[in-house]
Image: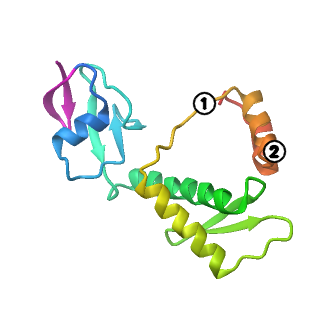
Amino acid sequence: MKEVKISGNPTSVTENATLAEIAHSMNPMNAYLVANLNNRIVELHRIPEAGDNIEMLDISNYHAYMVYQRSLVFVMIYAARAVLGEDIRVVVEHSINKNYYCEIFKTGFLMTPDILEQIKLKMQEVIKANMPINKHSFRLDKAIEIAEQMNLPDKVRLLKYHIKPC
């Protein structure tokens, strides 16, 4: 066991417990999305150190809501690619009052209500399957290579101007 502070309260937790396991033991009914660990927003797969300050964040928190919203974008892109093929390009243009305006590009493609329904059903399937979203870090040259392979010219341009390592 080790001692951490959860919302300012000293708490003993299992040595190798992840933030997700700690959150579940605190309140199995609350859907925490991320944690504030020593004033840094982090994923729940992290294992805190003794003495760490932890605050669990649910969707009512701005940062957690942004993680939730971005996660749904990943699910939508995954579903669109599963339905329409890997050669599509999904562009998330801008937000409009907690929503995103998106466009899908594919040669000879015309969006129909049937295609939207297929994407929606695939999204629901992915969510029901509770598929994980894993964060990966790459060297800058590798990130550019991946973006090129995925036909993401906007990302390639952005990454070429990226200063700190990915």
Above or below for 8 versus 91: above
User: Would residue 99 appear left or right of 140 to someone viewing this image?
Assistant: left
Residue 137 is marked as 1
Question: At 71% across and 68% down in the image, what residue appears?
Answer: 103
Front residue of 150/6: it is 150
Residue marked by disc 2:
157
The amino acid type of the residue labelled 1 equals Ser
User: Is residue 95 inside the magenta stretch?
Assistant: no
Q: In which quarter of the image is residue 78?
A: bottom right
Label 1 neighbour load within 10 Å: few <14, some 14-19, many 20+: few
User: Is residue 3 inside the magenta stretch?
Assistant: yes
Q: Where is residue 160 in the image (x, y as percent from the top left)?
A: 80, 37
**Distance from the alpha carbon under mark 2 to that under mark 1:** 18 Å
User: Would residue 5 appear left or right of 165 to someone viewing this image?
Assistant: left
Question: At 86% across and 66% down in the image, what residue appears?
Answer: 107
Residue 161 visible: no
Nearest to N terminus: mark 2 or mark 1: 1
Q: Position of residue 157 (x, y in %)?
A: 81, 44
The residue positioned farthest toward the bottom in the image shown: 113
> Under tag 1, what secondary structure?
loop
Q: The magenta stretch spans which residues? A: 1-14
Question: At 51% across and 72% down in the image, what residue appears?
Answer: 97
